[in-house]
């Protein structure tokens, strides 16, 4: 499948998941919903591997990286995201997640030695500006509420969303290390999601959060969509994209997904964006085009005596 199609799949699906998460809030503690989501997603991935005649076991040296990916991407990031949406509007969470265009190159620099380029920061600044304009009205309403007697929940939600974006960025970089251990993306995703599920479940037990089942059909509809589409399909497309074009370019799905979210609102919720929102869409698309046209980052060469060690 072409990289452009993978980019579109991840962006379109994740463009709807910020709203879909709200279907799971209320009756069930946020962390419990994360357990249900990735427990179902990992089960689907393992079942698919078995149906294809594959084995499920992987060596411990590979499991260590998948544990780290599970902790960052499917535990810390999503527990923070679900809790953030209890305090701030999903639009603001989408804006703060766009900060991944900065965090990911920094994490890649720290973890893999990938060089940072001026284009990375110029495209990132444009992306954040575009997403902010896109949700200008929602952000303005939230800030107005905060300055007129609102609770500290707004600040807590914003902080959780930033932590979630940093954890997701670090997890995106770990994808490269997982790939070095196994080329079976479906299997490694299954293990990473399982480890994430286990970590969140242990957190829920330690903090006394009840494993309850909701009565609303909308919850189960959201759960199935988020598990199969928002987790299995979208992450498969995203991780494949990282392996092809690198995490610094693949992360721009987080800029396109808010645009998709707004376009869906126009179609399904009769939302009528103003001039500033349309300008934000244009800036977002421009920043993505600018970032994706960047040449691939060159490996870092480190000279050790008479040998040269090349790191990706």
Image (spheres, rainbow, N blue to C red):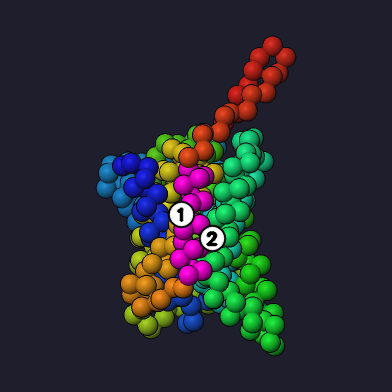
The prevailing secondary structure element of the residues shown in magenta is helix
Q: CA distance from mark 1 to mark 2?
A: 8 Å
Graded by Cα atoms within 10 Å as few (under 14), some (14 to 19) or many (20 or more), the crowding at tag 2 reads many
- Position in image of residue 143 (x %, y %): 64, 78
Report the front residue among 20 and 67: 20
The reply to whether dot 1 and dot 2 touch (C-beta < 8 Å) is yes
Residue 228 location, quadrant: bottom left
Badge 1 or badge 2: first in the primary sequence: 2
Q: Position of residue 189 (x, y in %)?
A: 44, 49
Q: Is residue 50 above or below residue 97?
A: above
Residue 43 in sight here: no
Q: Nearer the viewer, residue 191 or 271?
A: 271
Name the residue at the top extreme.
306
Q: Position of residue 223 (x, y in %)?
A: 39, 69
The residue at which mark 1 appears reads as: 285
Question: Residue 38 versus residue 149: which sits nearer the camera?
Answer: 149
The residue positioned farthest toward the front in the image shown: 275
Magenta residues span 275-292
Q: Which residue is mark 2?
A: 130
What element does badge 2 sit on?
helix
């Amino acid at each position: 499948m072409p990289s452009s199609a993978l980019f579109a799949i991840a962006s379109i699906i994740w463009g709807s998941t910020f709203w879909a998460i709200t279907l799971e809030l209320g009756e069930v503690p946020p962390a419990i919903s994360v357990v249900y989501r990735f427990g179902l997603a990992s089960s689907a991935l393992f079942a698919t591997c078995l149906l294809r005649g594959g084995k499920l076991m992987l060596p411990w040296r590979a499991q260590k990286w998948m544990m780290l990916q599970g902790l960052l991407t499917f535990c810390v990031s999503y527990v923070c995201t679900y809790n953030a949406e209890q305090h701030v509007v999903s639009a603001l969470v989408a804006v703060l997640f766009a900060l991944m265009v900065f965090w990911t190159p920094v994490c890649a620099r720290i973890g893999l030695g990938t060089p940072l380029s001026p284009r990375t920061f110029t495209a990132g600044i444009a992306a954040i500006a575009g997403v902010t304009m896109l949700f200008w009205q929602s952000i303005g309403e939230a800030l107005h509420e905060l300055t007129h007697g609102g609770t500290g929940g707004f600040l807590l939600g914003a902080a959780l969303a930033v932590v979630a974006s940093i954890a997701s960025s670090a997890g995106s970089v770990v994808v490269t290390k997982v790939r070095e251990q196994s080329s079976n993306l479906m299997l490694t995703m299954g293990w990473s999601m399982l480890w994430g599920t286990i970590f969140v479940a242990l957190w829920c037990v330690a903090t006394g959060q009840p494993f309850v089942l909701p009565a609303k059909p909308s919850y189960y509809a959201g759960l199935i969509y988020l598990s199969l589409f928002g987790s299995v399909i979208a992450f498969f497309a995203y991780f494949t994209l990282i392996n092809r074009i690198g995490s610094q370019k693949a992360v721009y799905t987080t800029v396109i997904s808010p645009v998709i979210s707004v376009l869906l609102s126009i179609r399904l919720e009769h939302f009528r964006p103003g001039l500033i929102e349309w300008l934000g869409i244009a800036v977002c698309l421009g920043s993505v085009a600018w970032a994706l046209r960047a040449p691939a980052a060159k490996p870092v060469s480190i000279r050790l005596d008479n040998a040269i060690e090349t790191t990706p």
